[in-house]
């Protein structure tokens, strides 16, 4: 049938109409279609059926065939009034087919509170050219319900309160003009529910409190220009949910407290405009929910309090646009933000997740991970390849920063070291200097482990030789002073060094011909001489009243160097703490 028209004209002729299947009608409707300039586009012929004859078929329990017919002012309210039937009493219809039919009414095309018998209900390719379309409260039996390729020129639909048996509900390739599309409180069967490639234009699209059972829900490539898209309180069963490449326009998109069931949910490449995107309180029992390569606009994005402990949710390469993004107190099995540009505030204070993947992200604003009024339970955070231009608010202890990186399964030692470096620089910029020191120590340790692993992979002589510098670095930089982050440890190292050298002197004097000779009349014991000489040597005082003899000279030289080094080490560590 002709599409893309702005207006039309109907002429009824007392001329017999013969349909392709041989059905006849005593009158013919000539419908002429016009474009926006009033220019004629096309004209088509339909059988002009009498409304009373349709009502008679309903009353007689006959199957109604309106294929290629023109129907004016169809109204079940009128039928009930003529037959003394209560307003909301179900009227049985044996069956109906209205393919490529043309409906118009001054107010509404009323199909409300009908009980359809088993079998297909088919409006494929029909046009509802004028008036609201109402199916409220109707009950459909087993079979497919088809509104594919249908044109709703008025744009106002009421399917609220309908229920469907086993079979598909197909709304594919339909065009609905501006208006309110009400699909609230519907009970769908276990077949496919498809709005694929449908154009909803502007207005409200309401699926509040609707029940989708097992099967498939298909919203793929659907286009909405703006208004409101509301699935609030809807419940899905074990079905695949497809919103791939859906265009939501500048609509307010509301999936609050939706139960997505246990199926796979796909929002890949979907486009959200500048309205609010709200998934607060949504839940899922298992499976995956994907927003890969989706696009979002200027409005806020609310993913708070989501209950998806067994669900993997992926926003890989999603464009979040402007506006804050919040996942406050949500629960996921895995949440992926891989390769995203995080240009605005991200609240990632998750109540629970096994893995937060922020690999290859570019952070230009703030990521908030620091617990405030509830514990943030993130087992692992993967920050490999992150470009941190903004800041991450995170606490070393409460967020268990060491564990969330060390426990990563798929990252190398080098990648772990790089992540600790990112945390170190971040803590420095946020003024958490104590946490900065802890992150720096872990960075240096994993950097050293990574270097050793790389040398071991080369094998042979290089592998054997690499253990010497690795042990030296561990002993001097890590064990003695935690890479100049712990002055107290350096002091303990100094004390241990002093005592060690003192004991060496005692042993050398007792078991060799080496000695510490007094240049004065003092007569100190071996232990006293050893500890005294060790003190003036370690601290490079050098009074000269006692001097080493033979092998002790070489040990004294080593102690002097060690003392000078550790005192400098302590100075660096102490000043670093004080100046910050």
Image: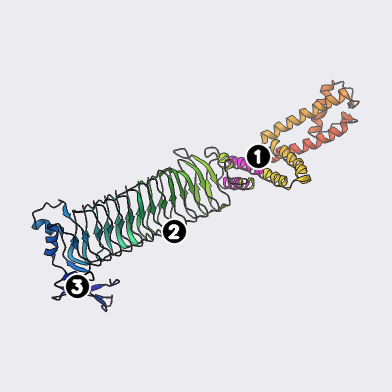
Q: Which mark is residue 269?
A: 2
Query: Of 34 and 385, which appears nearest the observer?
Result: 34
Within-10-Å neighbours for mark 2: few <14, some 14–19, many 20+: many
Q: CA distance from mark 2 to mark 1?
A: 48 Å
Return the x and y of residue 32 as percentages of the image width and height: 23, 76
433 within the magenta span: yes
Q: CA distance from mark 3 to mark 1?
A: 94 Å
Query: Of 153 and 573, which appears nearest the observer?
Result: 153
| Camera sees residue 459 | yes
Q: Secondary structure at mark 1?
A: loop
**Magenta residues, start to end:** 417-446
Q: Give the colour scheme shown.
A: rainbow
From the image, give the main secondary structure of the stretch colored magenta. helix
Q: Which mark is residue 18?
A: 3
- Residue drawn at 39 percent across, 55 percent down: 242
Relative horizontal placement of residue 83, taking residue 563 as reference (left or right): left
Relative horizontal placement of residue 346, taking residue 384 as reference (left or right): left
- Residue drawn at 64 percent across, 47 percent down: 414
Q: Which mark is residue 485?
A: 1
Vertical order, 510 against 351 (above or below): above
Q: Secondary structure at mark 3?
A: strand
Q: Secondary structure at mark 2?
A: loop
Quadrant containing the N terminus is: bottom left
Q: Nearer the viewer's eye, disc 3 or disc 2?
A: 3
Query: Of 413 and 420, which appears nearest the observer?
Result: 413
């Amino acid at each position: 049938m002709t599409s893309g028209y702005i207006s039309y004209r109907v002429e009824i002729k007392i001329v017999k109409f013969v349909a392709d299947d041989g059905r006849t009608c005593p009158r013919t409707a000539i419908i002429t279609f016009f474009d926006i300039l009033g220019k004629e586009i096309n004209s088509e012929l339909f059988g002009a059926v009498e409304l009373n004859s349709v009502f008679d078929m309903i009353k007689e329990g006959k199957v109604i065939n309106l294929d290629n017919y023109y129907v004016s002012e169809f109204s079940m309210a009128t039928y009930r009034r003529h037959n003394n039937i209560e307003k909301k009493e179900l009227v049985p219809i044996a069956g109906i087919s209205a393919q490529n039919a043309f409906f118009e009414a001054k107010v509404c095309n009323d199909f409300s509170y009908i009980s359809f018998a088993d079998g297909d209900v088919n409006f494929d390719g029909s046009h509802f050219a004028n008036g609201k379309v109402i199916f409220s409260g109707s009950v459909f039996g087993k079979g497919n319900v088809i509104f594919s390729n249908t044109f709703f020129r008025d744009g106002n639909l009421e399917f609220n309160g309908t229920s469907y048996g086993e079979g598909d509900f197909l709304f594919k390739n339909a065009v609905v003009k501006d208006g309110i599309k009400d699909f609230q409180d519907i009970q769908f069967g276990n077949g496919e529910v498809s709005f694929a490639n449908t154009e909803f234009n502007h207005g409200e699209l309401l699926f509040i409190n609707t029940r989708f059972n097992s099967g498939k829900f298909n919203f793929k490539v659907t286009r909405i220009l703006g208004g409101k898209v509301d699935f609030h309180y809807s419940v899905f069963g074990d079905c695949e949910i497809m919103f791939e490449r859906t265009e939501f326009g500048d609509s307010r998109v509301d999936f609050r407290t939706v139960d997505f069931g246990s199926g796979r949910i796909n929002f890949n490449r979907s486009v959200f405009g500048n309205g609010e995107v709200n998934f607060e309180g949504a839940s899922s029992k298992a499976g995956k929910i994907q927003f890969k390569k989706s696009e979002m606009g200027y409005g806020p994005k609310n993913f708070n309090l989501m209950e998806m402990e067994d669900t993997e949710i992926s926003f890989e390469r999603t464009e979040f646009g402007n506006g804050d993004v919040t996942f406050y107190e949500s629960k996921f099995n895995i949440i992926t933000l891989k390769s995203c540009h995080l240009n605005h505030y991200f609240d990632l204070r998750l109540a629970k997740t096994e893995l937060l993947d922020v690999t290859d992200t570019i952070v230009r604003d703030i990521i908030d991970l620091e617990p405030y009024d509830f514990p943030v339970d993130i087992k692992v955070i993967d920050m490999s390849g992150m470009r941190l231009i903004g800041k991450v608010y995170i606490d070393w202890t409460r967020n268990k920063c060491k564990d969330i990186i060390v426990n990563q399964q798929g990252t190398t030692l080098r990648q772990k070291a790089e992540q600790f470096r990112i945390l170190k620089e971040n803590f420095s910029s946020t003024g958490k200097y104590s946490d900065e020191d802890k992150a720096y120590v872990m960075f240096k340790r994993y950097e050293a482990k990574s270097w050793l692993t790389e040398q071991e992979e080369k094998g042979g002589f290089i592998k054997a030789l690499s253990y010497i510098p690795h042990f030296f670095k561990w002993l001097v930089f890590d064990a003695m002073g935690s890479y100049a982050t712990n002055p107290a440890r350096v002091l303990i190292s100094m004390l241990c060094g002093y005592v060690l050298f003192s004991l060496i002197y005692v042993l050398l004097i007792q078991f060799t011909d080496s000695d510490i000779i007094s240049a004065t009349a003092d007569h100190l014991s071996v232990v006293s001489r050893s500890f005294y000489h060790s003190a003036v040597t370690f601290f490079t005082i050098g009074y000269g009243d006692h001097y080493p003899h033979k092998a002790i000279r070489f040990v004294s030289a080593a102690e002097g160097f060690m003392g000078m080094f550790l005192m400098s080490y302590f100075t660096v560590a102490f000043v670093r703490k004080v100046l910050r």
